[in-house]
Amino acid sequence: MDFGKYDYRTLRWRSRYRMTSQSMLFLLFFSHIVSGQIRYSIPEEMKKGSVIGNVASDLGIDVQRLRSGRARIVTGESIQYTELKTDKGTLVVNERIDREQLCGDVTPCSFSFDLILENPMELHHVTVEVLDLNDNSPSFHQHEMQLTIGESAALGARFVLPTANDPDVGINGLQDYNLNPNEHFILKKHLNSDGRKYAEMVLEKPLDRERYPSLSLKLIAVDGGTPQKSGTVNIDITVLDNNDNSPVFNQSVYKANVMENASKGTYIITVNASDADSGSNGLIYYSISKMQGSIDSLFEINQTTGVIFLSGQVDYEKARKYEIRVEATDQGALTDSSKVIVEVNDVNDNPPVINVMSFTSPLSEDSPSGTTIGIINVKDLDSGDNGQVNCRIEHNAPFKIKSNLRNYYTLVTDTALDRETVSAYNITVVATDAGMPPLSTKRTFHLKVSDVNDNAPGFSKGVYNGFVVENNSPGVSLLTVRAQDPDENQNARISYILEDANIGGSPVSEYVSINAETGVIHAMRSFDYEQIKQLVFVVKAQDGGSPPLSRTMQRIQSEKNILDEPDSPLEVSSLLFPD
């Protein structure tokens, strides 16, 4: 699209209208997870803070929901090009977006990210298409080209010219080559199978060194933007005598394969050309044409044998195919060119990557089975089986993993939890691809189980007996009761309580008291064996939970006879019995 002909606000309006009118928002419900998709189109190089679109409006989400759901953008990339303004529900530009830097020559150009909300979980996929502006001029790898051509060069002889590079795409990219008018050469334009344009200079009228010992031409590359931009390379030709045959390749296209983990120096293919001339005029030298990008740094050719070998590291995830133009040049600078297509074979050299979207810890022990504790995203840069990933939980743990959306997994409880049995878990998720051999990645999550007051205190004995000598001093310790609670913190804090009762018409509290924290029972008075021979009372142990849980002791009648002797002890007994 020609941005010189459209107002940006109109462009953005059209983009948003297209999105809503074509119903590009889809909601999927998987295990209470809401999923949707939305797409925007923006020009590159927008100023930071520029509004891309109103996400809340386009997704039908209330702005308050964005805040309460802790809406956030998840990209998995080091650069976050957009920012979500939760107070307005708008998506704005956060970093400079250069389409050429982001996508190179890939069209259409876009980047995607996920918008995640919680309580309940929502996942919305957002794609932002970046439209090209004509902000780059065509440029050549070299500013000058030196040619030496024999005057006996045959009509129709071809001379490969430098290739221009324009990072822009579409109409803004490289459109045409022009050669300044001259009486000897015409320009022939070609198109590679990948859509790239290149040109050759063809001799149309014989050269005469005595008349024109040298020629100076200009090759101009132009794009189709408005205004149009161009780049130029100067071609200086020196005319020589007596070389009237050009080299000829025995194939117009060569094909080869290479593994992406191949080492430097790996053999690729051998090209071959022949020249009908004899002597030094028939000697051929091979070279790789200067191409766009870094192809000439990945491959080298032996200039005398035509053997092409690997000089850099190829990566299937970056480029699956390379197209190389090779030239055969004789001593008189006559040339022929051929094409070498190198297919890159994928190797399982990327392990899966586990990204944590959310994780909840601690988790209450009364959480029901099936409670979601975490969401993870798993990706593998390889392709085919090498990029197919399976996730599992290592060891026998009471959890399982579910796949609800592509590349997204949820961790859920598989049974009820009991903090008193296991208070914490180390959950190890293993992601394994289907390559040969397979590659795996592990991620361990530490989950703490929080306590619920689900256990009442328990006494350590069924019956407590104590003896005291009559005429004792008030305040003397009679015995100590002990209770335990397997819960923790406040839920396990025990208080001891003396239950109301009457002994001989008087409250039990006039005879004994109990320390609420230690469980120590003290005499409140001096006892007389002739008046009372046995005390039976009830103690309750109560924890600090909400609501509190407790256990009490039921009074019993002692069967032990105590002799009426001086200093005979007084028995205090009780029996533990749950309510």
Image (cartoon, helix red, strand yellow):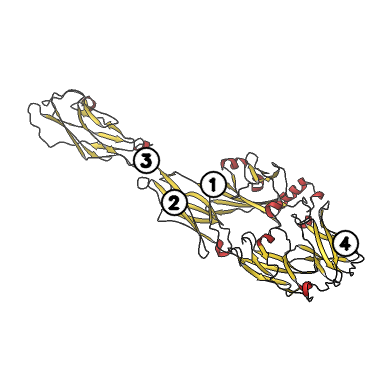
Q: Nearer the viewer, residue 520 or 103?
A: 103
Circle 2 — which element? Answer: strand
Going from N to C along the chain, the mark reached first, 1 or 2, is: 1
Pointer 3 with pointer 4, Cβ within 8 A: no
Q: Is residue 369 visible?
A: no
Q: Position of residue 73 (x, y in %)?
A: 60, 46
- Tell me if residue 383 comes above or below residue 466 in the rendering: below
Disc 1 marks which residue?
A: 120
Amino acid type of the residue tagged 4 in the rendering: Leu
Identify the secondary structure beneath mark 1: loop
For the residue marked with disc 3, what is the amino acid? Asn
- The label nearer to you, 4 versus 1, is 4
Q: Which residue is mark 2?
A: 427
**Label 4 secondary element:** strand
Say few, some or many: other residues with alpha carbon within 10 Å of mark 3 (under 14 / 14 to 19 / 20 or more). many
The residue tagged 3 is: 453
Reading the chain from its start, which is encountered first: label 4 or label 1? 1
In the rendered structure, which amino acid carries the disc numbered 1?
Answer: Pro
State yes or no: discs 3 and 1 in contact (Cβ < 8 Å): no
The one of 286 and 213 positioned closer to us in this rendering: 213
Q: CA distance from mark 3 to mark 4?
A: 97 Å
Q: Is residue 459 above or below residue 369?
A: above
Numbered disc total: 4
Residue contact between numbered discs 4 and 1, judged by CB atoms under 8 Å: no
Amino acid under disc 2: Ile
Describe residue 368's horizontal placement relative to residue 108 as left or right: left
Residue hosting label 4? 215
Could you tell me residue 194's position as x and y percent? 72, 64
Q: How far is disc 3 from disc 1 in space, using C-alphas?
A: 27 Å
Which residue is rendered at x = 87% and y = 66% of the image? 185
Residue 296 seen in the current view? yes
Q: Quadrant of residue 574?
A: top left
